[in-house]
Image: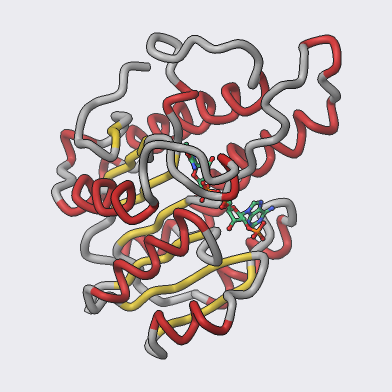
């Protein structure tokens, strides 16, 4: 049975990844800052490992990696993220807001990926996916503001591309994934996609991932997203 680790697995897109992989018989390591609600926990079945992780806390990432030491993981999905306030004008941006967004969306995924490298190496699939965003695209996405969020996701893509070069020798496939605009708490449940459809699409991309796809930003629809 393959194993998948998902961060931010307690709600939204992360919870839906956990549901779909569990339904397909994968062993799910559901990682979250906030515990899963009892009804979701029950729905996922009991062949599940549930662990705490706060992206803003390096010690919690280290403790997670220690807990998982020696355990092969086939697919890691770095999903936890924050949107911040999308409407802040440039003159009102604070270093504190910027720091939270960049630490959560960019540094924490890179740090956790590095800590879980031995687990991924020991896994069979060797896929490192990160939930990115169309907002990362300089070519395709032209909206006002969202400064910190857009910078954080563009930097996340760059990190995944870097890792695709650094980890090519052992066959790791690094995939930044665009989920589309999904009805979750982050979008105040606006959007044109359900988490079910978005995740089904991203799982298909992960399932057909090849080394040639590594370091390329793919959408839930299987299309390449321009940088
Ligand atoms: N929804 C969309 O349309 C959309 C579009 C593009 C990209 N995305 C990306 O998709 C990912 C999932 O978002 P979502 O739409 O499912 O939103 P969501 O419902 O707001 O979920 C966000 C998840 O991230 C977790 N998280 C936030 N800060 C964390 C921290 N410091 N440590 C650990 N976990 C933390 C949250 O945990 P808590 O419950 O503990 O806060 C929650 O599980 C994000 O990376 C987001 O940027 C979403």
Quarter of the image containing the N terminus?
bottom left
Q: Is residue 71 above or below residue 219?
A: below
Q: Coloring scheme of the render?
A: secondary structure
Is 153 or 183 nearer to us in this picture?
183
- Say left or right for 177 vs 102: left
Residue 102 position by quadrant? top right
Q: Residue 211 placed where, x, y %? A: 18, 40
Residue displayed at 53% across by 30% down: 153
Q: Residue 109 placed where, x, y %? A: 54, 46
Residue 106 position by quadrant? top right
Q: Residue 157 placed where, x, y %? A: 44, 30
Residue displayed at 54% across by 68% down: 31
Residue 151 position by quadrant? top right
Q: Residue 119 placed where, x, y %? A: 40, 66
Is 223 or 190 nearer to us in this picture?
190
Question: Could one spot residue 176 in this view of the protein?
Answer: no
For the image, the number of numbered tags is: 0
Residue displayed at 30% across by 68% down: 21
Quarter of the image containing the C terminus?
top left
Question: Could one spot residue 91 in this view of the protein?
Answer: yes
Q: Is residue 12 above or below residue 224?
A: below
Q: Which residue ends up furthest to the bottom in the rendered image?
A: 46
């Amino acid at each position: 049975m393959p194993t998948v680790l998902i961060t931010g697995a307690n709600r939204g897109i992360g919870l839906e990844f956990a549901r779909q992989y569990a339904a397909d018989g994968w062993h799910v390591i559901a990682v979250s800052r906030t515990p899963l609600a009892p009804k979701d926990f029950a729905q996922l079945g009991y062949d599940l490992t549930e662990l705490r992780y706060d992206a803003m806390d390096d010690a919690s990432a280290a403790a997670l990696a220690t807990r998982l030491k020696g355990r092969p993981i086939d697919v890691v999905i770095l999903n936890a993220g924050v949107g911040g306030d999308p409407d802040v004008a440039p003159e009102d941006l604070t270093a504190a807001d910027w720091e939270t967004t960049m630490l959560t969306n960019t540094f924490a995924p890179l740090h956790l990926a590095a800590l879980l490298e031995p687990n991924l190496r020991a896994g069979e699939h060797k896929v490192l996916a990160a939930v990115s965003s169309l907002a990362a695209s300089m070519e395709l996405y032209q909206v006002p503001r969202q400064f910190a969020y857009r910078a954080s996701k563009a930097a996340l893509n760059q990190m995944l591309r870097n890792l695709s070069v650094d980890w090519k020798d052992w066959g790791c496939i690094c995939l930044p994934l665009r989920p589309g605009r999904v009805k979750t708490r982050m979008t105040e449940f606006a959007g044109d996609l359900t988490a079910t459809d978005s995740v089904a699409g991203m799982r298909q991309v992960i399932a057909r991932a090849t080394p040639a796809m590594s370091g390329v930003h793919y959408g839930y629809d299987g299309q390449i997203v321009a940088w």
